[in-house]
Amino acid sequence: MKSPDEPPRGAHGGGPGDPPSEPGPDTPSEIRDAFTVHAAPLPAPPGAFGEIRRAAARRRRRRVAVCGAVLTTSCVALGVVFAQQWTPPTEDGRGPAATADTLPTPSDTSGSTVGGTPDRSPDPSPSSPAAPTKPTRTAPPDRGAPSPSRTGSASGGAEGDDPGRTECASADVGLEVAGSEQAAGSRYVTVRLTSTRTTPCTITGYPDVVPVTASGRTVGNGADHVASDVRAVTLEAGATARFVLKAANPDNYDRETCDPAPAAALRVAWPGSEGSDRLPVEGLRTCRSDEVTSTHVTAVEPGA
């Protein structure tokens, strides 16, 4: 007879006649449960998220600093390249003279005896008077005008540099129109200079030329300079030199901007001297407006 507390045979899954089953490795056990530690998640320490954000911000700042350094280096490199390619201005601070075309310079007569003057070195010294400077004005339109013909040798004048030389004054030089021709919308007037002195005198650079009316009133701007070879030209008694005036046709410009007007003569003054000469020129027209300069002049050069 069985005890009431005794489980029936086969209560643990065995069939009748099977021995009672023993606890296996998969059977819960109080001892196993006693020694099993269940891990519980720990809360994040105070300030952990703030430290993560600060670290991310530091990484961003480092990236920005690296990009800034690369950009700065690139700008410095570009600046160095620009500095190497930049061309400084000339010593007098001016660029090329504003002109539509450059008149050809005469053949070099350096080292030759001209007008009875002995040879002199063509190398000018700092004591040579410099050509007067003028503000750059509007140049006439370029229409491919040819240069005026220039014939003859550089007779009657001598080039050179002499610290004790005498500059020619207006009263020492006679003026006359040696030639005039029209080409491609411009008029070219060759002006001959003749020394009236009994002793040598020197002219260096550009004459100051201004168109005037018959009464002597100025018409428009004075002539700008054509880029040419500036040299000291010494005139013996009765010797000659020359310069060329280019007068662009006022019709080449906008009529309202130019305000065309006739001029009866040219008022000519020499560098470094007082006074002026008046040279009548027939049929001369120019721009009366100060906004346009339609006349240009070369430097004085030896020649008839």
Image: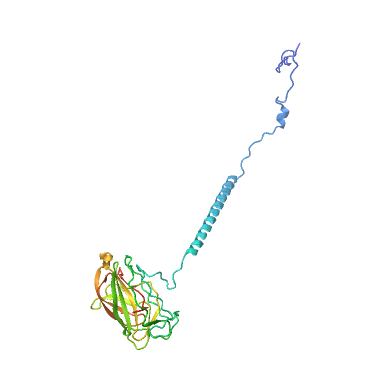
Q: Residue at x 58, y 49 (%)?
A: 55
Q: Residue furthest top?
A: 1
* Relative horizontal placement of residue 203, taking residue 79 as reference (left or right): left
Q: Say which residue appears at 55% left-offset and 51% top-offset.
A: 63
Give x and y (percent) for residue 98: 36, 69
Q: Is residue 304 left or right of residue 38?
A: left
Q: Quadrant of the C terminus?
A: bottom left
Along the viewing direction, whichever of 23 and 238 lies nearer the viewer: 238
Q: Check the image and name the residue furthest to the front.
A: 152
| Rendering coords of residue 75 (x, y %) | 50, 59
- The answer to whether residue 61 is left or right of residue 219 is right
Residue drawn 27% across the image and 64% down it: 254
Q: Is residue 95 above or below residue 164?
A: above
Res 240 quadrant in image: bottom left
Depth check: 303 or 90 in front?
Answer: 303
> How far across and down, in percent of the image, does residue 193 sit?
32, 81
- Please say which color scheme the image uses: rainbow
Q: Quadrant of the N terminus?
A: top right
Q: Position of residue 15 (x, y in %)?
A: 71, 14
